[in-house]
Amino acid sequence: MHSTIRVASPVVAIILLAGRCVAQEAGYQTEASASFGYEGGKTERPLVVVNGFVSPAFAFRGDSTRHDLLVAATRSLCPVPDDGATPLELLSYVARSSTLSASFALGATSSDSYGLARGMVSTVESRFTADRSDRGGRLAAEWFFERSTSVRASGSTLSLRETADSRSTDSPSGVSVLGRFGTRSSSWEGSLGVVRRFGDASVAVDGTYGTRSLTRDEDSLLSGGTVLSDTLDLEEITRSVTLSGRVLLLSRRLAVDVALSYGVDTSNLDETAPEFRTFAMTRTIHREAAGAATFYPLRRLGVGAVLSYGTDSAVSGFEVLFPASARKSVTYGVRARFFPRARASAELTASRTEVSRVEPPEATTFQRFTETHDRVTLTGSIRF
């Protein structure tokens, strides 16, 4: 890297950076990786309460599968040396070199659900299927002003398209409603943070701001041949702050990471066709605490566990906001990364997320959903 630096400017920061690069040992500067992920999800509605009494008249289940691909690359502005003692996975963290990184992701999700509602004189049976595809990209950078302080920033975009079909049938009348939905969404997000190093420990604060625009076209066909069409638009703004830290213990054989985050989303949902109507405004508060620990019995091998707990609470309404939903989630998983060679690795992660959601909370009539998501990801990376 130092052979390509041309001292064409009197900027002191560039001169100092070049000096540090020359002083370092030769090492890798680029790390490229590819990840393949699979996720299976299951949703149930085990509890419906009407006016304070549990009702057995409702049933619901949902299933989903997701496949995704992520390719990423990180370039260090100075070579990352190998000191012969630090676990290979931690070399870039210990080197404290400024970096540039980019990633691109593709994903596809298929889902279906079934619902049943029994009344005094009729029963409504509903089915829903959907296919979604999404793609996104991210650019990030971290710049060390000195060995103990760095600033990092990132920007990302995500686009999504979904098509869905539904069918509801009433018995014994036989009246049915067929629906078709098309959804497209685009979003972007930017973050800025400061990292402070204390030997083999670090503390960081990151702030994030983002927006999302979503349009949904709905067409419904009633049994009598009547067609109803409308278009819904959602505009959302997200803000969050995250406090995180890392510490290396046991002569860098154990890495412990923790993070606390708090975020607020505000959104407006409007009907734009066949006529304009404001449906509702929603405000959602997110809170999450996460931790991870990785042990390195060998320089080439790291095994670890992750655990996180999060809560979401949402209020919604037109002029007055009322509690709309309350959500709790727990994620736990394990990971292992092995370097068969000094500059190549394979990583396997497996996790489960369990979600409980109540809509609406603090009411005498509500429904509770439970979700389970199992995810496996395989990642291969090379350094050069």
Image (spheres, rainbow, N blue to C red):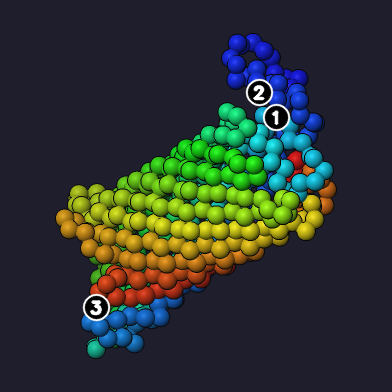
Contact between marks 1 and 2 (CB within 8 A): the answer is: yes
In this picture, is 1 found above or below 264? above
Crowding near the residue tagged with mark 2, few <14, some 14–19, many ≥20 C-alpha atoms within 10 Å = some
Along the viewing direction, whichever of 206 and 349 lies nearer the viewer: 206
x and y percentages locating residue 372 in the rendered image: 51, 71
- Distance between the Cα atoms at labels 1 and 2? 8 Å
Pick the quarter of the image with the N terminus: top right
In this picture, is 138 found above or below 36? above
> Residue at horizontal 44%, vertical 42%?
207
Q: Amino acid at mark 2?
A: Leu
| Furthest residue toward left | 319
Reading the image, the residue beneath label 2 is 17
Q: Is residue 149 left or right of residue 295?
A: left
Q: Is residue 158 left or right of residue 74?
A: left
Secondary structure found at label 2? helix
Contact between marks 3 and 2 (CB within 8 A): the answer is: no
x and y percentages locating residue 254 in the rendered image: 69, 55
Pick the quarter of the image with the C terminus: top right
> Residue at horizontal 50%, vertical 70%?
354
Along the viewing direction, whichever of 294 and 64 lies nearer the viewer: 294
- Dot placed on the residue nearer the N-terminal end, 3 or 2: 2
- Dot placed on the residue nearer the N-terminal end, 1 or 3: 1
- Distance between the Cα atoms at labels 3 and 2? 64 Å
Reading the image, the residue beneath label 3 is 364
Reading the image, the residue beneath label 1 is 78
Crowding near the residue tagged with mark 3, few <14, some 14–19, many ≥20 C-alpha atoms within 10 Å = few
- Distance between the Cα atoms at labels 1 and 3? 62 Å
x and y percentages locating residue 82 in the rendered image: 79, 39
Q: Amino acid at mark 3?
A: Thr
